[in-house]
Image (spheres, rainbow, N blue to C red):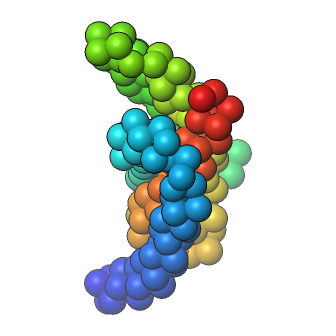
Amino acid sequence: MRFWRTVAESYFILLACAIISTFSGLLAESNLGFLTTFSFLLFMVPVINDISGNVGSILGARLSSALHLGTIARGQRRELYFNLKALSLSSLVMYAATSLFLLLYLLAVGGSAKYALVMLVSGLLLTPAVILSSTLLALFSFARGLDPDNVTGPVITSLCDVLGMCSLVLSARLIL
């Protein structure tokens, strides 16, 4: 019974994720001229999407476990706030460290340090959106009787592809 429930929940979620991920490609296509002018940005896309997708999926999994265990119940928000703070800090540290390593690399090869700033600003823009999205997805799916494990992982990964591309293009257009 549990197997078929997972299949039924996942089918429509994965279909929605395919549609969501298409928007990331459309966004990249609509900014192709800009992205090829500053081709180093293309290197940054998987890094940004990976960090944000990992953080969002980890938060979703932690919240899902807490919801199933009942440690995040009405009036008991300490566990929720702990997870939000921990994953927000973790994400910001990851983006800061990645930006620092990128800066060191760029200085060593004579590249523009502005790319490291683009990475950092993208992460600063993306982190709150990912944390909020993952939290709302977990809480909403659980409240609707769906298993948050079947919802948050796939949806947040697809959503991070779109949000990651948006934050990268936005920060690059502001900085470069």
Nearer to me, 91 or 7:
91
Above/below status of 101 relative to 56: above
Q: Is residue 115 left or right of residue 125?
A: left
Quarter of the picture holding the N terminus: bottom left
Quarter where residue 47 is shown? top left
Q: What x and y, as percent, mark residue 5?
A: 39, 85
Residue at 44% from the left image edge and 58% from the top image edge: 157
The residue sitting at 49% across, 47% down in the picture is: 35
Question: Is 20 on the left-hand or right-hand side of 1?
Answer: right
Q: Quadrant of residue 31?
A: bottom right
Residue 52 left/right relative to 4: right
Q: Which part of the image, by quadrant, shows the C terminus?
A: top right
Whole-percent x and y of residue 10? 41, 79
Let me know if residue 97 appears in the view: no
1 relative position to 31: left or right: left
Residue 95 appears in the figure: yes
Q: How many marks?
A: 0
Quick one: 105 or 110, which is closer to the camera?
110
Vertical placement of residue 33 versus 95, above or below: below
* Residue 20 higher or lower than 89, as above or below: below
Find residue 144 and report its image quarter. bottom right
Q: Residue at x 49, y 71 (%)?
A: 22
In the rendering, at what x and y percent does residue 42 appear? Answer: 40, 44
User: With respect to residue 153, does 129 lie above or below?
Assistant: above
Q: Position of residue 143 (x, y in %)?
A: 63, 68
Task: Please name the residue shown 55% across and 41% down the image.
Answer: 168
Residue sitting nearer the eye, 112 or 161? 112
Out of 73 and 160, give the one closest to the viewer: 160
